[in-house]
């Protein structure tokens, strides 16, 4: 049983920072209506900015990261001869936005389609819930393009005839619908957009990644493959690069798995142990910074991991919400006889005793978080896709905390690079062990990597055994709040036995 298994659990997951503050406002309105003094929480949404303020530093970091990613030895995880590059048409890099680290997400529009087929592309599936999919905006999956003699691209869609399409920033058609006097502008790259970009509570769609390519690989099995990765907050320095450093293995794995056509959601979590008026608690709060079908949003990463107060603000706002929902109210009697009711939120998370730098403790509490999250989704309180529990992945970043590292000159830091690579491979190997039906291929690839690094085959076997244990068995919570059910534990143990047996047989067939 873990050291904190008996502590109270406060687990939360918000689809965005906006959702967190929307819930805060909702709670404040409810409390005020009940005569409760809600002024003790004075945080406002701008306390966690939507754009990372030091944009030049962020853009420079992204550039250096791309050079690092391209050179670090990570290409051996999948067979290179299978790689087939193709550009993603959804994004257009704009130098005018580079200082903000932003990219305009594209949509494709035709006025004739808007008149003749107003409901063709926005009345079913995920597009039905996308408020930017108004009449005339077509499904991006059906967009075709050809390069013209002048170097420009022609975009079109083939229905009963060919319709030319106008490339514009996602949300432009909706903006012109709700704000007809908005001005249609054009970037130097040719994409149309409106000015203003923001109107009331609506905005054009931006992202913060760069034009990227995907690596197309054969699909195995009939269902889509997905992984859910969680980056823990670690605020140990005021320098952006040093704060993002511990997350590099997880970011690299996210990009690499995405290129391998495995959908990845990337989340930021703040897992802590703290004390309040009711005793000790474990708190884990999570936010997605990349949904399964989206690119990595560097702004969200930099804000939630790179701004020192963001974790404190998010955690204390969440604590305030939880205390209200749990009826944690204090009654103060003042000298004049006036009675005030307020939320008992004094120092709710000020007494943080550990930031989960301990791998074992982190994994055990994260196992409970997995069970809580799955229950919330299954009972409809959280709208989210679920993946298999072994593919809900987090890691302690203890090895890299405070590590001196200059990403622009990373070759000078071999110890840090080795740690980054080892964590990176642990994630990729875990995913390969889970999804790959050819255990012999998995064993051969891992064994070769160990041999190339002058490591023994025994170490390779022990390493695989450790991964399988971590995936299926070792950190399943077996008692206390949010423990796995006996049926779940039995299935986990059986999957562990089956996978270890198959991998042992695979190594044996290789003479190991």
Image (spheres, rainbow, N blue to C red):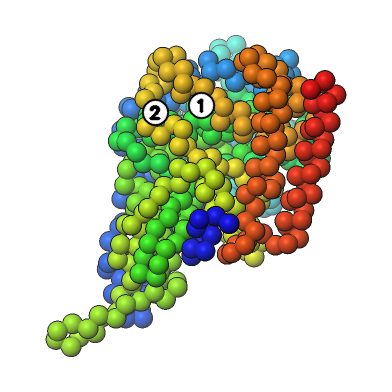
Left or right placement of residue 330 versus residue 425 in this view: left
How far across and how far down the image is residue 470, in percent? 65, 42
In the drawing, what numbered circle is on residue 479?
none
Residue at far top of view: 149
At a point 70% along the width and 62% down the height, the residue shown is 485
At a point 14% along the width and 86% down the height, the residue shown is 336
Left or right placement of residue 20 versus residue 72 in this view: left
Circle 2 is placed at which residue position?
Answer: 403
Between 496 and 208, the residue placed more toward the observer is: 496
Q: Is residue 231 above or below residue 483?
A: above
How far across and how far down the image is residue 269, in percent? 48, 48
Asked if the residues shown at circle 1 and circle 2 are in contact, with their CB atoms under 8 angstroms apart, the answer is yes
Q: Is residue 80 visible?
A: yes
Tell me which corner region of the image, top left, top right, bottom left or bottom right, holds residue 401.
top left
Q: Is residue 204 visible?
A: no
At a point 48% along the width and 65% down the height, the residue shown is 8
Q: How many labels does the image show?
A: 2
Q: How dense is the environment of label 2, judged by Cα within 10 Å: few (below 14), some, or many (20 and up)?
A: some
Which element type, helix, strand or loop, lies under badge 2?
A: loop
Q: In this view, does 110 lie above or below 482?
A: above
Which element type, helix, strand or loop, lies under badge 1?
A: helix
Q: In this view, does 482 lie above or below 110?
A: below
Circle 1 is placed at which residue position?
Answer: 419
Left or right placement of residue 226 versus residue 364 in this view: right
Alpha carbons under labels 1 and 2: distance apart: 10 Å
Q: Quarter of the image containing the N terminus? A: bottom right
């Amino acid at each position: 049983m873990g050291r904190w298994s008996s502590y109270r659990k406060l687990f939360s997951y918000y689809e965005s920072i906006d959702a967190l503050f929307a819930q805060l406002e909702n709670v404040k309105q409810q409390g005020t209506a009940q005569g409760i003094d809600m002024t003790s929480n004075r945080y406002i949404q701008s306390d966690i900015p939507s754009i990372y303020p030091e944009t030049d530093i962020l853009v420079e970091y992204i550039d250096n990261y791309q050079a690092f990613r391209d050179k670090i030895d990570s290409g051996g995880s999948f067979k290179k001869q299978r790689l087939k590059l193709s550009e993603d048409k959804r994004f257009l890099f704009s130098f005018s936005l580079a200082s903000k680290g932003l990219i305009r997400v594209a949509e494709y529009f035709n006025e004739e389609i808007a008149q003749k087929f107003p409901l063709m592309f926005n009345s079913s599936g995920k597009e039905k819930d996308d408020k930017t999919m108004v009449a005339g905006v077509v499904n991006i999956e059906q967009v075709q393009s050809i390069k013209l003699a002048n170097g420009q691209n022609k975009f079109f869609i083939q229905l009963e005839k060919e319709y030319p399409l106008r490339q514009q920033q996602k949300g432009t058609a909706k903006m012109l619908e709700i704000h007809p006097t908005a001005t249609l502008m054009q970037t130097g790259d040719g994409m149309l957009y409106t000015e203003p970009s923001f109107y009331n509570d609506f905005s054009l769609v931006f992202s913060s990644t760069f034009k990227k390519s995907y690596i197309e690989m054969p699909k195995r099995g009939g269902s889509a493959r997905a992984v859910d990765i969680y980056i823990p907050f670690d605020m140990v320095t005021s320098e952006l690069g040093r704060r993002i450093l511990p997350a590099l293995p997880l970011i690299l794995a996210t990009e690499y798995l995405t290129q391998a056509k495995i959908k990845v959601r990337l989340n930021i979590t703040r897992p802590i142990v703290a004390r309040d008026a009711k005793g000790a608690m474990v708190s884990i709060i999570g936010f997605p910074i990349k949904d399964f079908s989206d690119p990595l949003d560097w702004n969200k990463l930099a804000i939630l991991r790179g701004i020192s107060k963001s974790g404190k603000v998010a955690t204390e706002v969440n604590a305030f919400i939880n205390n209200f929902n749990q009826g944690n109210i204090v009654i103060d009697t003042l000298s004049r006889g006036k009675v005030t009711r307020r939320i008992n939120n004094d120092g709710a998370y000020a007494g943080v005793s550990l930031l989960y730098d301990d791998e074992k403790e982190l994994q055990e509490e994260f196992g409970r978080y997995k069970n809580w999250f799955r229950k919330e989704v299954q009972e409809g309180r959280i709208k989210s896709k679920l993946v298999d529990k072994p593919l809900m992945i987090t890691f302690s970043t203890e090895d890299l905390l405070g590590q001196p590292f200059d990403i622009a000159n990373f070759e000078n830091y071999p110890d840090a690079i080795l740690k980054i690579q080892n964590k990176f491979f642990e994630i990729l190997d875990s995913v390969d062990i889970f999804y790959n039906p050819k255990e012999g291929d998995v064993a051969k690839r891992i064994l070769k990597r160990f041999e190339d690094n002058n490591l023994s085959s025994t170490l390779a076997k022990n390493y695989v055994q450790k991964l399988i244990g971590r995936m299926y068995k070792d950190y399943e919570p077996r008692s206390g709040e949010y423990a796995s059910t006996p049926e779940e534990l039995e299935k986990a143990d059986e999957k562990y036995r089956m996978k270890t047996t198959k991998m042992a047989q695979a190594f044996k067939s290789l003479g190991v």
